[in-house]
Image (cartoon, helix red, strand yellow):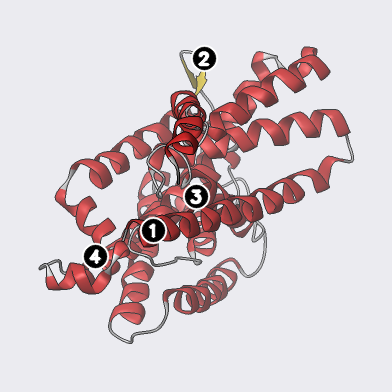
Amino acid sequence: MSTTETTASAPQKSMLTRLGIDRLSALYLAGAFIVIFGIWKPDTFLSVASFKLILGENVAIGLLALAFLVPLATNSFDLSIGAMTSLSLCITTWLSDDFHRSFNMPAGLAALCGVLACMLFGVLSGFIVVKLKVNSFIATLGLGQIVTAVLLKISDNRQITSAYSKSYLKFGSYELFGIPILFVYLMIIAAILWFVLEQTPAGRYLFATGGNIEAARLAGVRTDRMVWGSLITSATIAGITGTILSMKIGFFSTATGPGYLFPAIAAVFFGASQLSRRPNVWGTLLALYALALGIKGLQLVVGSGSFWVEPLFQGTTLIIAVSLASQQAVARIKKKKKTA
């Protein structure tokens, strides 16, 4: 490249860098949605009630996105998290419903049992991936079906309702300074996870394992332990998601849980292009709520027939996010070849 071409391209690159479009596209997208739908549907979209709904309704998706993010840091996949969420919700509701009156089992203890059950399945998932050397995509996909079979057996494939006391359900319904408490739970878990991934040696080892597992192993990182631990953590967060859902909706249905998996994955891959340009906590949540603003705006515009909006929006976003990530990867490889 000539000196003239370099000088001509420098201002453009500098402008993009200053605006942060390459790292903050989700933030710009969220702003665009607020402006567009704020003008289109000002009375409903810009209301406090709408923003509270957006914050509260997407907590389960956000938690599952964080659950998916942890093993992804090691270049592993956990596709069982949707089923794990259902299992936790099922066990929590079932124990509270069937045993509460006879054995006085508190809902909090039932919730702990649900999380522990998911944690045990996470241990099994790690064993299959690490010890049996099964690809994580296949292993967790199969395990998700096994978990589904277990929860169907426990629930007898029926809806379980009226299992919780009003005091327990308050943990999922009240607000803190006008913010839904469910969103506060999400932020607390996100902050803890961010600290572990970005500020501790464990987080660095996880990303080193995902970056180049052989190089990390040669450097002394216990890569098998990292992968196994990430899958246990993922299952545990999915179990906590089920517990939080029990506080929010107050019943169990077999349809609850798996439906959150796809939007969670879409948020993670879109968020990977934000901020640090790799899978990260705050980029994931930024992407999640940017998409949530667009979905809510389209739902308000379309009206009662908006059931098709969410899957269309999420599917399109996932394709675009993965395409952009692929193009960026190709560009980096070409740049390395040129410099070499």
Is label 2 in contact with label 4 (beta carbons under 8 Å)? no
Estimate how packed mark 2 is, as few (under 14), some (14 to 19) or many (20 or more) residues with alpha carbons within 10 Å.
Answer: few
Image mark for residue 268: 3
Q: Is 72 located above or below residue 228 in the figure?
A: above
Q: What residue is pinned by disc 4?
A: 226
Q: Amino acid at mark 2?
A: Gly
Estimate how packed mark 3 is, as few (under 14), some (14 to 19) or many (20 or more) residues with alpha carbons within 10 Å.
Answer: many
Numbered disc 2: secondary structure = loop
Label 2 – label 3 distance at C-alpha: 28 Å
Choose the circle earlier in sequence order: 2 or 4.
2
Residue 95 is at least partly visible in this image: no
Residue 16 x/y as whole percent: 50, 29
Q: Is 185 located above or below residue 39 in the figure?
A: below
Q: Quadrant of residue 6?
A: top left
Q: What residue is pinned by disc 1?
A: 338
Q: Quadrant of residue 51?
A: top right
Numbered disc 4: secondary structure = helix
Q: Amino acid at mark 1?
A: Lys
Choose the circle earlier in sequence order: 2 or 3.
2
Q: Amino acid at mark 3?
A: Val
Residue 201 x/y as whole percent: 15, 50
